[in-house]
Image (tube, rainbow, N blue to C red):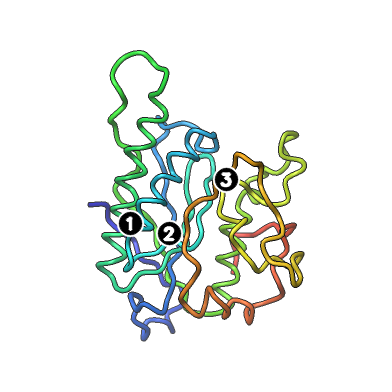
Amino acid sequence: MNGVDLAVHDPKLAKHDPNHERYPVHVVLRVVSAVGNLRRRCVYQAIREATLTTALREDFRIVHLSIQRNHVHLLVEADDKQSLASGMQGFQISAAKHLNAAISKGKRGPRRRGTVFPDRYHAEIITSPRQARHALNYVLGNWRKHKEDRAPKLADWKIDWFSSAVMFPGWAEYDDEAFLWRGPDTYDPLVVYQPRTWLLRAGWKKGGPPISYREVPSAGR
């Protein structure tokens, strides 16, 4: 089973139970270099299959996800510590299976069966509206942080289609018309849950101004 590194940055938060179901979690998963660039259509479909498998669970829920070149960001909700661990394990197993199949397709020789994810992932407990707003902006806007939006082919993109940004109803530009943007006819969104925790559902709005799709997230809080 993959390990987990739980990070709570503010010592004052030590009194909180970081595994309580009311707190969402920001998880970062890095992949080994042999997997290659994750921002490819075949890889997107592989990870989407893993989100579909994970959606069958009730005790662990992926609320948002973004795929970068060598890592994946997730915002998840879990009923308890064990649900977080087993939910992440299930997602990683499914993603690794589909990723290995996707990157092996069309290549000679046996199908790749090597490691996809390192042994540990980083998970940060979200306990405040400000932290929740930052996490949403950071995950959904991460492609802008990595300057992926500057690629000529992506010049017309408002949001990152290698993420669940299309499922976020809180973009400042939406005003009263949620889910305004649509992808290509052949686009299959990642399978994610609507949030149940107050912080991701509504509390993040108390953490700062509405989130614009133009905003470039920073590492600072």
Question: Do the CB atoms of the residues marked 3 and 1 lie less than 8 Å apart?
Answer: no
Give the image quarter of residue 93.
Answer: top left
Q: CA distance from mark 3 to mark 1?
A: 20 Å
Per the image, the residue denoted by label 1 is 88
Outermost residue on the left side: it is 1
> Which is more toward the observer, 117 or 54?
54
On the image, the x and y values in percent for residue 89 come to: 28, 53
Within 10 Å of the Cα at label 3, are there few (<14), some (14-19), or many (20+) other Cα atoms?
A: many
> Within the image, what quadrant is residue 155 found in?
top right
Q: Secondary structure at mark 1?
A: helix
Q: Would you place residue 129 above or below residue 125 in this image?
A: below
Identify the element where label 2 is drawn. strand
Q: Nearer the viewer, mark 2 or mark 3?
A: 3
* 131 to 47, vertically: above or below: below
Q: Residue at x 58, y 79 (%)?
A: 202
Residue 218 sits in quarter: bottom right
Say left or right for 167 vs 87.
right
**Callouts 2 and 1 close, C-beta under 8 Å:** yes
Q: Nearer the viewer, mark 2 or mark 1?
A: 1
Mark 2 and mark 1 lie on one chain; the one further toward the N terminus is 2
Q: Amino acid at mark 3?
A: Phe
Element carrying mark 3: loop
* Circle number at residue 27: 2
- Identify residue type, mark 1: Met
What's under tag 2, amino acid-wise? Answer: Val
Distance between the Cα atoms at labels 2 and 3?
17 Å
- Expressed as whole percent of the image width and height from the top left, the position of residue 178 reads 69, 66
* Whole-percent x, y for residue 88 in the image: 33, 56
Counting from the top left corner in percent of width and height, residue 5 is at 34, 61
Residue at which label 3 appears:
162
